[in-house]
Image (spheres, rainbow, N blue to C red):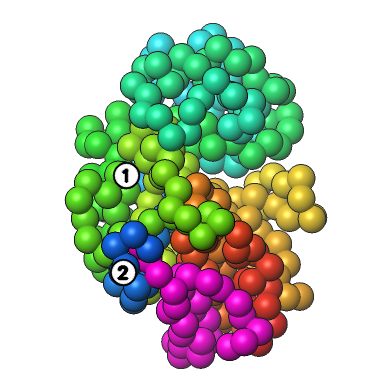
Amino acid sequence: MSTLPIPRGVLLLARGDELVIDRVTGSADDTAGLPCTRATRFQIASISKQMAAAAVLLLAERGALGLADPVSRWLPHSPPDWSRISLHHLLTHTSGLGHWPEYPMIDLGRPVEPDELLAVFAGVPPLFAPGAGWHYSSPGYVLLARAVERASGRPYAAFLAEEVFGPLGMTGSFAGAPAGRVDVAVGHEGGRPVPSWDLATVSMGAGDVWCTGDDLLAWLDVPRRGRLLTPASVALMTTPHAAATRGGEAYGYGCFLGPLAGERAVHHSGDNAGFKAFAAWLPDSDRRLVVLANQAEVDPVLLGGLLAAR
């Protein structure tokens, strides 16, 4: 265990159905003096994009929307230059929309009315034509969450609770602001609590989900065992649709596809204010990795590599 340093959070490694590393350590909330436990919920940050992708695929299976649908079908007041952007482009980060650095006018910690937020996104020209490149884009996943709301007729957080977390038995998971829930970790940086980003509007669909370590481990059974989605949808999620700009990896729907510890892996990391996260499935050895930390200084990707090497 000494080779797996983590000041506060959860480390899980499963091989097949056997849990071979199970570590819970540190404080969930320094101010309240609460320790991390197996019931503690952490922000999983950008791993939330996998849940957004699953929500879109579920609605596509039902014929409620199409992956080739233009964004304008679900966001009728979108600008003309979005007319060629499809839901597929948003899912694969090939829409041309920017990431948060391209929208410095947005304060990630301040709630923003949905129409105001979309107006800010629309006010920045795309970086390239849809399908002509790859650029990681959390705003693109915010748009996907809005599309899920319109296609389902339900709030996004409610759709995830009823259609994703419930069927998978992820009883400790939810999306959005904590709103008085118990067993919720507080993010820390430099050993001090830090304010959370807004998860109800600004990060909806892109980084808004909270999970326990066990729930996130169960989530990895979606690609591993074909739970929740049809085989065709799992294949779409884990197909390398676009080459990512880092380390020879590719991007599917809500997940990176590339090597980890010398093996094929389906994975994603997460980075919110005071939180770091990593989840991966290595199909060749049937290993699943989960790292959840409420400490900004943790490097979950590096830690995931150390775990995977075991």
The residue under the point 46% across, 90% down is: 18
Indicate the quadrant where residue 176 lies: top left
The disc at residue 18 is none
User: Where 15 falls versus 134 (above or below)?
Assistant: below
Across and down, in percent, residue 103 comes to 58, 24
Q: Could you tell me what secondary structure mostly forms the magenta stretch?
A: strand
SS at circle 2: strand
Instruction: Provide residue 133's location: percent of width, then percent of height.
Output: 73, 33
- Residue 203's place in the image compared with 284, above or below, is above
- Magenta stretch: give its range: 1-29
Residue 119 vs residue 164: left or right? right
Q: Is residue 221 visible?
A: no
- Quadrant, the N terminus: bottom right
| Residue matched to label 2 | 34
Relative depth, front residue between 186 and 262 = 186
Pinpoint residue 254: horizontal percent, then vertical percent. Answer: 53, 50
> Could you tell me if residue 153 is visible in this image?
yes
Judge whether residue 208 is colored magenta: no
Taking the spot 64% from the left edge, 63% from the top edge, the residue there is 299
Between discs 2 and 1, the one toward the N terminus: 2
Choose mark 2 or mark 1, whichever is in front: 2
- In depth, the one of 162 and 68 nearer the eye is 162
Residue ID for mark 1: 176
Q: Amino acid at mark 2?
A: Leu
> Alpha carbon of mark 2 to alpha carbon of mark 1: how far?
22 Å
Query: Which of these two is toward me, 256 or 113?
Result: 113
